[in-house]
Image (spheres, coloured by chain):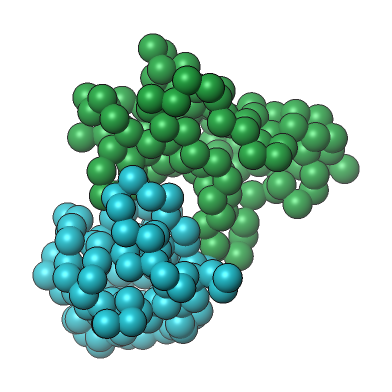
Amino acid sequence: KAGVTQTPRYLIKTRGQQVTLSCSPISGHRSVSWYQQTPGQGLQFLFEYFSETQRNKGNFPGRFSGRQFSNSRSEMNVSTLELGDSALYLCASRPGQTTDTQYFGPGTRLTVL
Amino acid sequence: AQKITQTQPGMFVQEKEAVTLDCTYDTSDPSYGLFWYKQPSSGEMIFLIYQGSYDQQNATEGRYSLNFQKARKSANLVISASQLGDSAMYFCAMSPDYKLSFGAGTTVTVRA
């Protein structure tokens, strides 16, 4: 079974721009979660989507949003980029139950200049 | 709120030796899962092992075993017979619900 895929792998943007990251979960997985990893804050939960609905949300500003499509693929959008948004963005999928193990993709490394 | 503590920022281990990575956690939830992930320099978070809070036996997966001491709220990872490919950052994580809460990580460097 193919793993979680994320595109693009690397991205460079400038302040004020917006960016969209994509995540394709493992086949059959209906839940997709997003995490932000920075050297200063570590790994932090952004949000989770299940069956096209946002099921849970972390403590991030409204500039961070996402959506999920009927095929379970998910996109994450960050508007009005700030320097502090530079991070590794990791997507994780699981079958559906919140107790299921989450499997991560390779991440998208975003640099904001 | 959950808190995960990994007190070892970095460790060196000789190839073929065993290494233990410490993890303590704090939660008021009676039901939770404990996880260990490996993150090589490429960035991908690789799932290693899982332990449920009600599991009576310690989890094992190949060369990985989890030393679960519930009363002490500790979930240490033991890697046996270390290999050069084990050099990476290791994260302990916990989930009583929908999200994973991670520790700060421990960098392991395996020496030939």
Q: Is residue B56 above or below residue B112?
A: above
**Residue drawn at 47 percent across, 61 percent down:** A104
Chain coloured cyan in this rendering: A
The answer to which quarter of the image holds residue B41 is bottom right
Q: Quadrant of the N terminus of chain B?
A: top left
A51 left or right, relative to B45: left
Judging by colour alone, the chain drawn in green in this rendered image is B
Kindly indicate the quadrant of the structure image that contains residue B107: top right
Tell me, yes or no, if residue A40 can be seen here.
Answer: no
Quadrant, the C terminus of chain B: top right
Q: At 78% across and 38% down in the image, what residue appears?
A: B82
Residue B86, x across and y down, in percent: 71, 47
User: Vertically, is A46 above or below B73?
Assistant: below
Q: Position of residue B49 (x, y in %)?
A: 55, 41
> Would residue A9 appear left or right of B72 to someone viewing this image?
right
From the top left corner, tell me how far across and down residue B110 is, in percent.
76, 42
Residue A69 in view of the camera = yes
In this rendered view, identify the residue nearer to me: B95 or B2.
B95
B72 or A30, which lies in front?
A30
Side of B32 relative to B70 (left or right): left
Residue found at the far right of this picture: B112
